[in-house]
Structure formats: C-alpha cells, structure tokens
Image: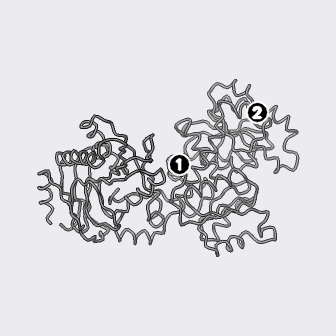
C-alpha cells in the first residue's frame, strides 16, 4: 500500500451510454467493483467519501421510482452531492430543450448527469454536447445499461458465471431497452441468448442480434437456465399488440405450473415494475426461483461502481500527483 | 546513513527510533528494479515481528478488548502474523480485521479510480470501545494512515487506536507517527521499500528497490 505503483482500473471513457459499446473487460471490471461495493450498504455508516467533491444531477424526463431512487442511494453512498429533477415542475414543461437544460445545469458547476428520457439516443445526444459524464438511465427503446449490468451481476451471483449459460428474455422485447442491454451484455460475456414472445412484440430483425427465437414459452423454459421476464409496457402500447392481458397471460405468462414443469432449476429475473398476473404470476414472483429483490439490491452496488469508475481523474493531474510521490 | 549499517543493526535485533524523520524528496517517475537490496531477511523480520507482538500487548496492557486491523494488502498478512504470535505467547486468539482504504484516499479524484483490491472486514464484535491496532507494512507519507483513521471512524469509536508498521521509511507529509516500529529503513532518493510477506509474495523480508544509493 505504501509506495508500490498501483494499476488503474480499465477505463470506461467519459460516459456510459449502452452495453453495446463496452468490452468484456470493461463489463467485468464494473461487476467486480460492484461486488466489492455491496458491503458498503450494510456498514453502520453507509457512506464512503470517494465522490465527495462530485456534483451529480439526476435528470428524469420519464417516470421512474426504482431506477431514480437506486441512483440517488448509490450517489449518496459514494459521498456525492446530488440534485434530482423531473419533467413535472421543471423548465422542460415550459419548452426548454434538453441541451439548454443541461447547459444551464452545467453553468451551476456539475460533474455528472444521469439521464432517463423517452427518446432513443437522447443520452448520446447529450453526451456529445456537454463535458460532464453522462450515464444513460434508460433512453426510449434503446438501452438501459445499468439494468443490464445488475441483471448480469445477479445471474453471476447465483450461477457463478455468465459464460455458457442459456438466458431467455421473455415478453415485450420490442419496446424494451432492458432487453437490448441484456442481449449485448450477455453475449459479450459469452452467454447464449434467446427471446420469447408474441411475434407482434419481437423486433422484426431480432435474429440479427444473434439470438434464438422461441414462439412458445414452454420451449423457452425447456431450453433456458435463466428467464428474464420483461414488463408488458402497457403505456407504450396504443393498440393492437396483444388481444388481451388475460390471453397474454394464458399463452406467455410465466406461471408456477410452467416453471415446475421445466427440466432445470430456473433462475427468474424481472426488471420491475411487475404486472402481476400478466407476464408473471405472483407465486413465481414471490417463489423460490425468483431473485427479483436481489436485483434491486444489486442495482445500488452496480450504480455505485459505474459512478466510481466514470468519475476518473484527469490525466495531467494524475501525472502531477505521481511527480509529487505516491501516498 | 548508509543502508548496510541499518541492515547490520536490524540483523543484530536492534531497531532505530528517529524522532525527526528524514526530509521527503519527491521520487522520480522512473526507477530501476534491478537495484534491489535486502535490508531485512526472513529471520530479521521474524525477530522484529516477535518484538512488535510483545510491544503491542505491553502497550495495550494485555489482550483485553484488543483488535488488530491490517491495511490491504500486506498489512492484513502482518496483522494475522502478529495475532498468531500473540496467541502463542498470551494464549488468547486476538480478533483481526482488514481495511481497504482506496475509497478514502485524498487523491482518488485526481489520479482516477483504482481497482478496489480488498474487502473491509472488521471483527464481529465491532470496534466500539476496543483498542484497535492498525497494522501496515510501510509507513511513508502518512496519507494511507489518515485514510484508515477516517474509515475506522465510520465503523465506530474505538477507545484507542495505535499504529504498528514493519518498516518506517520517513518522508511524512502529515503529522502521523507509528507507535510500534519494526525498523527504520532509510531509502535513497528515488528508491522505495518493499515488504515481502508469504501470503502475497511467497517469502518474508524487507527490500529497498531502486534509487541512487
């Protein structure tokens, strides 16, 4: 510890926009760091001073409870100062553009923006225009990288590895940024990935992402080690994707009978919020295969890791410190 | 002071106490690892650790409410060694813990995130009201110890905290001194001290690497 030169963590770059851009090494570095950070949330003082001189804005232009609260806890536990803004009650309602909002926030001296927005690509749009670190907390139907990472961490916790596992993403893949982040992250770490859902809720070219397609949930359960059950995004469906919720549950619902008929000890994830009795039945969601609440716990650790790894110092300052002697 | 004299003195079982540490000179960025000199061999380190274990118990008045906390990585190995030594002489197994101070460093945001190498794990009984001995391999600027004190404060309020290091190389940048020292190890300009422990390096010893000496 005293003076031996230490190695720095694999750099993540300025922003976290999606798992598609991350290498295997970068993803593993986030997961390993998150693994260490879990312990901070059970300390008597659940707070470390690592980000104490950082100011972070959570800009949530779309509703969220879990992700916003999870980011806020992560930021506070890393010692950062935080502000949260949402669409209602902000100047966004007065017609201010995204970039103007962000530039005004930057003028008050911020270091990072966590953004949730209904438009795909909004996080990248912002990242290219402001010097602060940008973390995508869900942009339209594009990606939700921290959800993908916490799913990876939860699977790895329970199965000890990702490589070689068969993971099936079930349900509304079409509208799901969670699905896209999962597919990229899982494949980067060497899992086999499949999707299962009604044809109307699968993207037309989904096979091009290198995934297997199952039309029947029973076949998916027969094949998979892990099911990631997506929320049916009722608010994004104006009309016509499915005949009725009851029929969806009857054909694609993850029910206890189906889970118990499967050949393997399934692991069942759900990004929340759940539509109980639609895509997942209560006795599965609360049952022994479910790791849904551990996903939530892991979410805080993963976000702490992302904040920590993105908050990196400036190269020239690092050089100055090295010249002055390593502590 | 020429290094070979320290070597001889340490082999003779002596230790130095320098009340006014050597002024710190900034290390140049490049140093040659080919210049590597042993300043304490296995026997010397074992003798120093045995004495340090006795000093710990002497300073704390026995093993009552005593906790040894090592700083990652080599401090953890040394803390366990000291605990075993105390166990042999006092017949009591003293609880040990570990601290990873990475998240408490004062230069974290300047040098960028470091890999978090170890867990912070304190004994089940906690540290409230305990006599905590912080154990590290090398004491240099004092910044690591400052971070460890801050981290410990977030886990409770020990009755007393002592600092125990195997090698004190001088060069303090903060008003921090060790209570129990294995050996003073002067280091030529640009050099560094490396402590080798079996758990991490496969052997036990203290070496000075590089520098103009």
Chain containing the residue with disc 2: A
Residue B119 seen by the camera? no
Per the rendering, the mark at residue A281 is 2
User: Of the residues under marks 2 and 1, which one precedes in the sequence?
Assistant: 1
**How many residues crowd around disc 1 within 10 Å: few (fewer than 14), some, or many (20 or more)?**
few
Q: Nearer the viewer, residue A150 or A191?
A: A150
Q: Secondary structure at mark 2?
A: loop
Q: Is residue A216 left or right of residue A54?
A: right
Q: Is residue A291 shown above or below B194?
A: above
Which residue is at 78% across, 34% downward?
A252
How many numbered badges does the structure rendering display? 2
How far across and how far down the image is residue A240, in percent? Answer: 88, 45
Q: Secondary structure at mark 1?
A: loop
Q: Which residue carries the number 1 mark?
A: A44
Q: Is residue A254 shown above or below A200?
A: above
On the rendered image, what quadrant is the N terminus of chain B found in? bottom left
How far across and how far down the image is residue B21, in percent? Answer: 24, 67
Which residue is at 65% across, 71% downward?
A129
Residue B51 seen by the camera? yes
Chain containing the residue with disc 1: A
The residue sitting at the front extreme is: B61
Q: Is residue B73 left or right of residue A55?
A: left
Quarter of image, res A231: top right
Q: Is residue B117 left or right of residue B92?
A: right
How far across and how far down the image is residue A95, in percent? Answer: 81, 71
């Amino acid at each position: 510890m005293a003076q031996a030169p230490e190695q720095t963590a694999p750099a993540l770059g300025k922003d976290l926009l999606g798992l598609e851009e991350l290498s295997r090494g970068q993803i593993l570095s986030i997961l390993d760091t998150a693994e260490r950070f879990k312990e901070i949330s059970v300390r008597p003082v659940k707070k470390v001073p690592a980000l104490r001189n950082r100011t972070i804005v959570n800009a949530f232009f779309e509703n969220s409870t879990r992700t916003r609260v999870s980011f806020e806890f992560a930021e506070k536990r890393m010692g950062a100062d935080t502000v949260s803004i949402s669409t209602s009650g902000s100047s966004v309602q007065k017609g201010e553009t995204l970039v103007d909002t962000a530039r005004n926030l930057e003028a008050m001296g911020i270091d990072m923006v966590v953004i949730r927005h209904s438009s795909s690509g909004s996080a990248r749009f912002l990242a290219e225009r402001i010097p602060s670190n940008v973390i995508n907390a869900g942009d339209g139907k594009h990606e939700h990288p921290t959800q993908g990472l916490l799913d990876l961490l939860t699977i790895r916790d329970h199965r000890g590895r990702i490589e070689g596992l068969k993971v099936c993403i079930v349900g509304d893949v079409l509208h799901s940024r969670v699905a896209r982040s999962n597919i990229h992250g899982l494949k980067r770490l060497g899992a086999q990935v499949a999707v299962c859902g009604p044809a109307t809720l699968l993207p037309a070219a989904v096979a091009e992402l290198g995934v297997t397609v199952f039309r029947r949930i029973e076949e998916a359960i027969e094949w998979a080690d892990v099911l990631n059950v997506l929320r049916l995004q009722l608010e994004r469906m104006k009309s016509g994707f499915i005949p009725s919720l009851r029929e969806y549950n009857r054909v694609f619902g993850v029910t206890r009978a189906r889970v118990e008929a499967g050949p393997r000890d399934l692991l069942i994830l759900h990004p929340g919020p759940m539509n109980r009795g639609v895509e997942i039945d209560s006795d599965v969601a609360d049952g022994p295969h479910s790791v849904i609440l551990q996903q939530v716990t892991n979410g805080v650790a993963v976000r702490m890791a992302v904040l920590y790894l993105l908050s990196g110092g400036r190269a020239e300052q690092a050089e100055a410190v090295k010249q002055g002697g390593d502590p | 002071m020429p290094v070979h004299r320290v070597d001889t003195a340490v082999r003779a079982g002596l230790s130095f106490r320098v009340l006014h540490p050597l002024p710190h000179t900034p290390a140049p960025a490049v140093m040659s690892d080919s210049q590597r000199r042993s300043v304490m061999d296995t026997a010397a380190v074992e003798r120093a650790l045995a004495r340090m274990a006795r000093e710990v118990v002497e300073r704390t008045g026995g093993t009552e409410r005593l906790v040894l906390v090592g700083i990652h990585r080599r401090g953890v190995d040394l803390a366990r060694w000291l605990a075993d030594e105390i166990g042999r002489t006092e017949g009591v197994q003293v609880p040990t813990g570990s601290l990873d101070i990475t998240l408490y460093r004062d230069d974290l945001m300047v040098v960028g995130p470091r890999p978090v190498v170890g867990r912070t794990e304190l004994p089940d009984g906690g540290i409230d009201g305990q006599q905590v001995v912080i154990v590290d391999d090398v004491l240099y600027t004092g910044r690591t110890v400052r971070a460890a004190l801050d981290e410990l404060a977030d886990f409770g309020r020990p009755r007393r905290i002592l600092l125990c290091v195997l090698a004190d190389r001088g060069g303090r940048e903060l008003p921090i001194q060790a209570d129990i020292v294995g050996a003073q190890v002067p280091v030529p300009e640009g050099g560094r001290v490396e402590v080798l422990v079996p758990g991490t390096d496969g052997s036990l010893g203290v070496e000075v690497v590089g520098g103009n000496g």
